[in-house]
Amino acid sequence: MAKAATRKTAAATPSVERRAALAGQELSATGVKLAVLPTAERISLRAPEASVAALSKALGVTLPRKPKTSASKAGRTALWLGPDEWLVIDEAGKDPLADCAEVTALHSAVGISHRNVAISVTGPAAASAINSGCPQDLSLDAFPVGAASRTILGKVEIVLLRTAEDAFRVECWRSFSDYVFTFLSYAAGDAAA
């Protein structure tokens, strides 16, 4: 009878390193620069009109109530996405989810910090690069500084915020971030041509 072979395996210490999506990627083309923005805390917030004042107070930023608008204060930005829906982004290292937990008024706040990735698109041809795959009218008259919209880029949903005349923040789901960055890279090359 043959003796069963035994294998010895050394206990290996895991050497896995967690990297941010799109870590280290950036692109500069004539008139357009793409950069991955630092991580931020984000929540998806839903609330009826009666709860908006209490939530605004807790968050320290007035939740906008008009389509295509945003409001910012002390590193926190609230983007209007619908009559009862906002995306709240905190770049100051504070936790908007914890702030909402203090509010007793009816609302739903869900942490989506690990779901989203943000890409900065800047330069005089930034709007042209984005418009290569986004039907949103990005003229300053139709989409002024501070304007925000849930829209599409190519095949995916994005949230777009105009941060300056020639600067945009593109928020997308992490699983689509490579597609969005690659799409914008090609579009930046075309806009530069």
Image: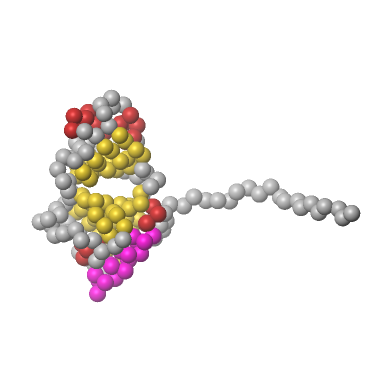
Can you name the residue that lies furthest to the bottom here? 193
Q: Position of residue 158 (x, y in %)?
A: 28, 54
Residue sitting farthest toward the front = 1
Q: How is the image coloured?
A: secondary structure
Assess whether residue 183 is covered by the magenta stretch: yes
Residue lying at the far top in this picture: please name it. 104
Counting labels gives 0
Q: Residue furthest left?
A: 141
Residue 187 appears in the rendering? yes
Q: Residue at x 55, y 51 (%)?
A: 16
Residue 56 is at least partly visible in this image = no
Name the image quarter holding residue 184.
bottom left
Instruction: Name the residue located 28 percent from the left edge and 60 percent from the top edge.
Output: 153
Q: 12 above or below 156?
A: above
Left/right placement of residue 115 relative to residue 166 reads right
Residue 98 screen position, x and y as percent: 34, 32
Residue drawn at (26%, 37%) of the image: 46
User: Could you tell me which quadrant the N terminus lies in?
Assistant: bottom right
Q: Is the residue 107 above or below the residue 167 in the image? A: above
Of 143 and 109, which appears nearest the observer? 109
Is 14 contained in the magenta span?
no
Which quadrant of the view contains residue 170?
A: bottom left
Q: Position of residue 141 (x, y in %)?
A: 10, 56
Spot occupied by residue 130 in the image (x, y as percentages of width and height)? 24, 62
> Taking 167 as reference, is 184 left or right?
right
**Main SS, magenta residues:** helix
Give the residues drawn in magenta, as a range: 178-193
Location of the C terminus by quadrant is bottom left
Judge by depth and name the residue closer to the eye, 146 or 175.
175
Q: Quadrant of residue 41?
A: top left
The residue that appears at 16% across and 40% down in the rendered structure is: 65
